[in-house]
Structure formats: structure tokens, C-alpha cells
Image: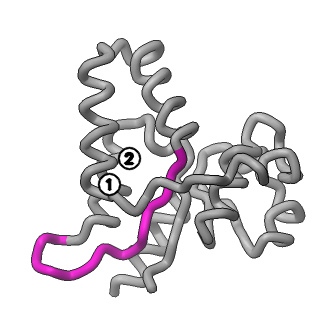
Amino acid sequence: MRFTALLDTSVLYPALLRDVLLSLAHGDGSGMAGTYRPLWSQDILDELGRNLREKAGLDAERTARLVGEMSREFPDALVEHYEPLVPAMPCHWKDRHVMAAAVRGGASTIVTHNLTDFPPDDLVKFDLEAQHPDTFLSHQYDLSR
């Protein structure tokens, strides 16, 4: 089973970072599996769509196409039925849905720019860690060598 990482909206929003992270997960086209399995939730995808429309100025059609392509390329990435866990998550209130999806999806890592919202003491209880995308990408590079 591949290493599993939940991708927060903060790392899916920047186009270049999103492309790098998803390319690593997809593999190289030679039949070799990607270096990890990405996860996200519908809440994360909805937030991504909102941010792309409101902050990046993308229209709804283009945003829907992007999210649809992500879903088609990674059909097993969507974590469902995490909502009952949200109230029990000890992290920052606005990111409880992220942590709940990571727990429900069996992720080892949450890849995010918002490290302060996921204190290590809160995550260790669920055998999780939060990593900045630079750290995550460095680890993926090291593991692939």
C-alpha cells in the first residue's frame, strides 16, 4: 500500500504546486505507481473552487473542469463520511474538517502551508503529522532515489 497524504486547500490552490504534487502522485506514465496516494475531501474541493473563483478570478466552468479532472485522475482520493469526526478534532476549528478527513482516510501526513493550525501534540494522537509542502516534496524526492 502506498504512502497516503491528505492535501489541504492551501497546497492545491497554487497551480504550480498542485501540478507538482499531483504529478508525483500520478506516476510517470510507464506503469510505475506514483510516489504517494493523495487524499482530499469534498469540503477541500469546495474551498479550492471558491478560492479559484474569488481570488484567482477563474470562472465557474473552468474551476469545475479542474476539480472534475482531479477527481477523474484520482478516483480513490475522495474521503467520505468524515463529518461525524469533525467535532472531536483538537486542531484549529477552521481546519477540523481537514484533520477529520485525514483520520478517516488513513493518511499519514497532512500537507499544508498552515502548520500552526495543526499542532504536533494534537496530531500524534491520531498517528498523523503535518508537513509543509517543501518538506513533503523533499521527502518524496529522497524516497524516490
140 vs 82: above or below: below
List x then y, in percent, for residue 10. Answer: 54, 39
Q: Residues within 10 Å of mark 2 (few under 14, many from 20)?
A: some
List x then y, in percent, for residue 68. Answer: 29, 39
Residue sitting nearer the eye, 106 or 54: 106
List x then y, in percent, for residue 26. Answer: 27, 65
Please give the name of the residue rendered at 36% of the width and 12% of the height, measured from the top-left corner: 57
Please give the name of the residue rendered at 54% of the width and 56% of the height, measured from the top-left corner: 79
Q: Give the range drawn in magenta.
A: 28-41
Q: How far apart are marks 1 and 2 (CA)?
A: 5 Å
Instruction: Give, as a three-letter code, the residue at label 2.
Output: Leu
* Residue at image mark 2: 17
Q: Is mark 1 on a helix, strand or loop?
A: helix
Tell me the quadrant of the picture where the N terminus can be found: bottom left
Q: Is mark 2 on a helix, strand or loop?
A: helix
Residue sitting nearer the eye, 62 or 131: 62
Q: In this view, does 101 lie to the left or right of 42?
A: right
Q: In this view, does 79 lie to the left or right of 20?
A: right
Q: For the residues labelled 1 and 2, say whether their Cβ atoms are less than 8 Å apart.
A: yes
Please give the name of the residue rendered at 46% of the width and 16% of the height, measured from the top-left corner: 55
* Residue at image mark 1: 20
Image quadrant where residue 29 sits: bottom left
- Considering the whole magenta stretch, tell me its main secondary structure: loop
Image quadrant where residue 99 sits: bottom right
Asked if residue 10 shows in the view, the reply is no
6 vs 62: above or below: below
Q: How is the image coloured?
A: one colour
70 vs 107: above or below: above
Instruction: Give, as a three-letter code, the residue at label 1.
Output: Val
Please give the name of the residue rendered at 28% of the width and 35% of the height, measured from the top-left corner: 66
Q: What mark, if any, has residue 86 been given in the picture?
A: none
Magenta includes 141?
A: no
